[in-house]
């Protein structure tokens, strides 16, 4: 017999009744039923119920066993009474009578319980992560993560890609985040960097003539933590291809991502990749307030500035006298009650804005039944399916005739402007609209968040669906409002649309062949067609304040390689942690990472970061300056 087990704790069935077996695992739960001990024995694969009574030669030893002890038992498989069968367990028809016991690892007093659904502070869970990872939900998440990665690899190989590894110790590179620096012992005063991404190396692989590359790549960025982002390191499906256009990249990666979500999405709807919309960045910002919109929510914001220009609502009218300002409306179908409007106004105030203006439309005093309003409202909800435009307009006008505007905004701007807004937004009885104004940068984030909240609270956001969209036409540059300096807004290695000619005009108008894939409010994929021509590369960096000498120094490998016949190439990277987070229906990315840092970028379990010893500092020619 094997030293530890003949079966896993999920393997025994009624076919094994009468067999002598050996199991090893952890004591999940203990129940004492009048001198008979029932123990749920757990391993990675499942749970088997074992029992021990005074007739067992190891009964006394079994009485000393406690939760989370690691034990080995020998015993005989017995059939459970029909009334005691547990259909929820694969092993629910049997139990094992214990005849021998070996304690493989005793456990002290537990800082958190593995059995049950108790909630514990995140600090406790991360400090004792090895216990936390024993819990059923965490075992499920980590198994899912492993299966997703394996599926990605298979799908990439099936599409003709090979996996190549790139260095972990490299040179610092400006890619939008802070580097983790590693001091060099052999070259005092100099530093390596952990790669923010394999960006330059995968481009060099293309220059080297390898047509298709992918890698499950670790990436390192010293970032501020968020619920959907690790503050130190993460993994991505990284890929690159030669002789491709932007659409070629979409056609390659979309079926891979869709296939993973179909395989592990537990029946949730996944739209055909061919139907995934391609939305320009500026359009996404206007309609959704974000470049990672949740398209399960049908609400689209609109610019309604003209209806407030010169109006009686002085706050918006004066705002519009300033350059670069606008008034944006967030439609709220079925949100037409003062209570809901006041709640959303309070939401905006909590987000740091003075509030949100609103108008809602209620049933007018015209003699009309609630049934008639409901009938017309239902027809309006289906308006996209109505092929007869004249009939639709007739019914819309009839429905709208029963809508009476309410709220302070409506009183200030008057009935004509209010009616024009209602018609533009396609709203009627029982609906509302919310308004934010100023420069888009000052309110856009809150507007996008408000759109999400409205969609959720009004039940408009479709559940059990993964809604994807490619966001395209990103601006390459941005301008600092205070200094006026131009810098890269996104990936600096992207090819500008229009090539060199595009760089001769206003940098803020230059769009790149850059793209993101958004799903349910998260950015899952980011990529670009690369700038592979040295002269365009120099010009692009020059506009962002990098001189030719600095470019040649900081990107020596890439710049030099481009002198020797670089092919057109492009690719992208998909965030594995975030994909698994969505599939696991978790709101916090740390729930799908085996050993994550906490929100302060600390490893409480291993004690990192830690202070180096004096010998280590001397060896590296470093000195730590105490912080005041």
Image (cartoon, rainbow, N blue to C red):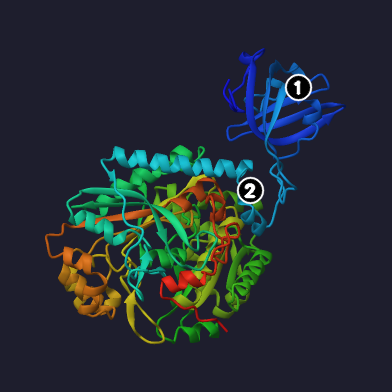
List the residue tagged with mark 2: 132
Residue located 40% across and 85% down the image: 323
Q: Quadrant of the C terminus?
A: bottom right
Relative depth, front residue between 278 and 458:
278
Residue with the mark numbered 1: 84
Placement of the N terminus among the 4 image quadrants: top right
Distance between mark 2 and mark 1 Cα atoms:
30 Å
Mark identifier at residue 104? none
Q: Nearer the viewer, residue 232 or 369?
A: 232
Q: Is residue 140 left or right of residue 525?
A: right
Q: Residue at x 68, y 26 (%)?
A: 73
Q: Is residue 438 above or below residue 97?
A: below
| 287 shown above or below 310 | above
Q: Can the viewer see residue 62 in this picture? A: yes
Callout 1 environment at 10 Å: few (<14), some (14 to 19), or many (20+)? few
Q: Secondary structure at mark 2?
A: helix
């Amino acid at each position: 017999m094997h030293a530890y087990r003949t079966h896993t704790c999920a393997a025994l069935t009624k076919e094994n009744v009468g067999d002598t077996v050996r199991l090893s695992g952890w004591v999940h739960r203990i129940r004492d039923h009048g001198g008979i001990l029932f123990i749920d024995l757990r391993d990675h694969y499942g749970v088997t119920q074992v029992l021990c009574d005074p007739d067992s030669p190891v009964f006394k030893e079994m009485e000393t066993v406690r939760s989370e002890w690691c034990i080995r038992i020998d015993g005989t498989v017995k059939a459970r009474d029909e009334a005691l069968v547990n259909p929820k367990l694969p092993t629910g028809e049997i139990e094992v009578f214990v005849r021998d016991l070996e304690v493989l690892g005793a456990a002290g007093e537990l800082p958190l319980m593995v059995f049950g659904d108790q909630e514990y502070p995140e600090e406790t869970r991360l400090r004792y992560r090895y216990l936390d990872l024993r819990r059923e939900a965490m075992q499920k998440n980590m198994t899912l993560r492993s299966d997703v990665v394996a599926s990605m690899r298979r799908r990439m190989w099936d599409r003709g890609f090979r996996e190549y590894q790139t260095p972990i110790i490299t040179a610092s590179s400006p890619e939008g985040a802070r580097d983790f620096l590693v001091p060099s012992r052999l070259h005092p005063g100099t530093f390596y960097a952990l790669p923010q991404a394999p960006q330059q190396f995968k481009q060099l692989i293309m220059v080297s003539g390898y047509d298709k590359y992918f890698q499950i790549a670790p990436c390192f960025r010293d970032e501020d933590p968020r619920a959907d982002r690790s503050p130190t390191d993460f993994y991505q499906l990284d890929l690159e291809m030669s002789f491709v256009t932007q659409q070629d990249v979409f056609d390659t990666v979309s079926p891979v991502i869709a296939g993973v979500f179909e395989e592990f999405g537990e029946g949730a709807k996944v739209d055909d990749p061919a139907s995934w919309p391609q939305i320009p960045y500026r359009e996404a910002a206007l309609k959704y307030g974000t470049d990672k919109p949740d398209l399960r929510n049908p609400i689209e914001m609109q610019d309604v500035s003209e209806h407030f220009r010169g109006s009686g609502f002085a706050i918006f009218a004066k705002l519009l006298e300033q350059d670069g300002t606008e008034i944006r409306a967030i439609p709220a179908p079925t949100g037409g009650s003062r209570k809901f409007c006041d709640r959303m106004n309070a939401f905006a105030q909590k987000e740091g804005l003075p509030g949100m203006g609103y108008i809602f439309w209620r049933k007018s005093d015209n003699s009309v039944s609630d049934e008639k309003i409901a009938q017309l409202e239902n027809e309006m909800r289906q308006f996209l399916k109505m092929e007869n435009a004249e009939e639709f307009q007739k019914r819309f006008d009839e429905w709208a005739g029963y809508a009476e505007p309410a709220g302070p905004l409506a009183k200030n701007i008057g009935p004509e402007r209010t009616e024009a807004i209602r018609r533009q937004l396609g709203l009627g009885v029982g609906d509302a609209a919310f308004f934010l104004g100023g420069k888009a940068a000052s309110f856009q984030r809150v507007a996008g968040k408000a759109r999400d909240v409205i969609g959720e609270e009004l039940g408009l956001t479709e559940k059990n669906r993964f809604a994807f969209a490619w966001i395209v036409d990103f601006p390459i540059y941005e301008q600092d409002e205070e200094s006026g300096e131009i810098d890269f807004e996104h990936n600096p290695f992207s090819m500008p649309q229009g090539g060199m000619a595009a760089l001769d005009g206003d940098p803020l108008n230059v769009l790149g062949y850059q793209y993101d894939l958004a799903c349910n409010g998260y950015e899952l994929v980011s990529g670009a067609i690369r700038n592979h021509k040295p002269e365009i590369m120099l010009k692009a960096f020059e506009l962002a304040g990098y001189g030719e000498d600095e470019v040649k120094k900081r990107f020596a490998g890439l710049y030099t390689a481009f002198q020797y016949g670089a092919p057109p190439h492009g690719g992208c990277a998909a965030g594995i942690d975030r994909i698994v987070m969505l599939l696991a229906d978790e709101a916090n990315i740390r729930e799908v990472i085996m050993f994550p840092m906490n929100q302060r970028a600390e490893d409480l379990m291993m004690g990192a970061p830690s202070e180096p010893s004096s010998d280590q500092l001397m060896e590296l020619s470093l000195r730590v300056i105490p912080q005041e």
